[in-house]
Amino acid sequence: MYQELLTGLLNGDIRSLARCISLVENEAAGYESILEQLPGNNHTKVVGVTGPPGAGKSTLVNALITSLLEADKSVAIIAVDPSSPFNFGALLGDRIRMGQHFNHPKVFIRSMASRGALGGLSPKIIEVSDLVKAAGFDYLFIETVGVGQSEVEVAGVADTTVVVVVPEAGDEIQTMKAGLMEIADIFVVNKADREQADIFAKNLRLLAHTKHQPGGWEIPVIKSVAIQNTGITDIIHAVDAHHKAVTGQHQRQLILLADRAYQLIQHKRMKDINKQLLMSEIQQLLEQNSFNLYRYINESSCFTQRGKEGKEA
């Protein structure tokens, strides 16, 4: 069955893609065999869209989809939503803005729950991105939760990172301090019809020119009003130009692949750590008045047993 799904995925079948994503997200038995057979793909332009809450990321992505469809491009969107505190599923409020594209044959939209993951992404984002790329889309947009300065993980997944801000985002000094700003390949000042937009964009350009980018890439600052489709074409041109500029940069590719490998290995090694068991052991030690966090980490059966099993294997 998995081989049929993989064949369908590689032929661009949307249902096969959706099914494969579900298998990977739920870690169904044998799901890794699908991932291990995925071919390499440098064709799909993977674009991370990130920024603070209220910046208009969903509206901007919606406008980008419309423009790309008019150019006869195929587009996939992975929208990472906050998780429901009750069932850990995705809260789909922002996806309503993309409703007009759901049934388009050249569009694939998938919401993923962050499931408490830091960094504005989902624990399975790397695997799902690779599945979507294997399906042969021209563009893949990854829209993050919108948790502010901590959502920097997207830079390790996307080829091009678009940081969306609004004129009220703060003065230039605050901008320079923001970790979020360190990952930008393209700045977009959305809602640029608001007061102070020109001054804010000017300050961003000054900041952007101080940042060294591989290959001599100069970070553009683009003003947009997504709800009016203003500046959308400029953003697409900047994404295409950046993709062309970084293609073939082996050092950048090496850094990105190493980062992705690190995240996957980290997740795999932490997979069998049971938080409930941790709480139970800690509770027992607290009752004995003998709890020391660092000694516990070195001696806990949650870790030492796993180490023994690894040596025996």
Image (spheres, helix red, strand yellow):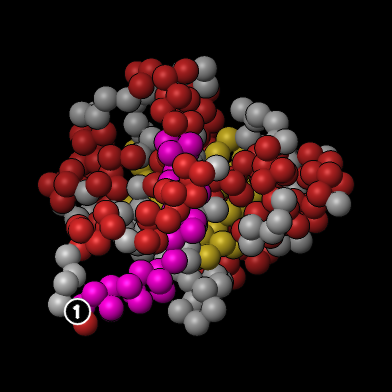
Classify 240 as above or below 27. above
Q: Is residue 82 left or right of residue 209?
A: right
Quadrant of the image occupied by residue 303: bottom left
Looking at the image, the residue that sits furthest to the front is 312
Residue 273 drawn at (x, y percent)? 44, 60
Residue 243 drawn at (x, y percent)? 51, 28
**Residue that carries the numbered disc 1 in the rendered image:** 288
Identify which amino acid the numbered label 1 is placed on. Answer: Gln
Question: Is any part of residue 182 visible from this angle?
Answer: yes
- Quarter of the image with the C terminus in it: top right
Quadrant of the image occupied by residue 19: bottom right
Q: Is residue 281 magenta?
A: yes
Residue at 16%, 72% in the rendered image: 290
Quadrant of the image occupied by residue 191: bottom left
Looking at the image, the residue that sits furthest to the left is 173
Secondary element type, mark 1: loop
Residue 158 drawn at (x, y percent)? 49, 40
Residue at 52%, 17% in the rendered image: 248
Q: Is residue 170 left or right of residue 182?
A: left
Foreground pick, 241 / 154: 154
Q: Is residue 287 magenta?
A: no
Question: Is any part of residue 105 visible from this angle?
Answer: no
Residue at 65%, 30% in the rendered image: 41
Stretch in magenta: 259-286
Foreground pick, 222 / 230: 222
Residue 92 drawn at (x, y percent)? 56, 72
Foreground pick, 196 / 170: 170
How many circles with numbers are drawn on the protein? 1
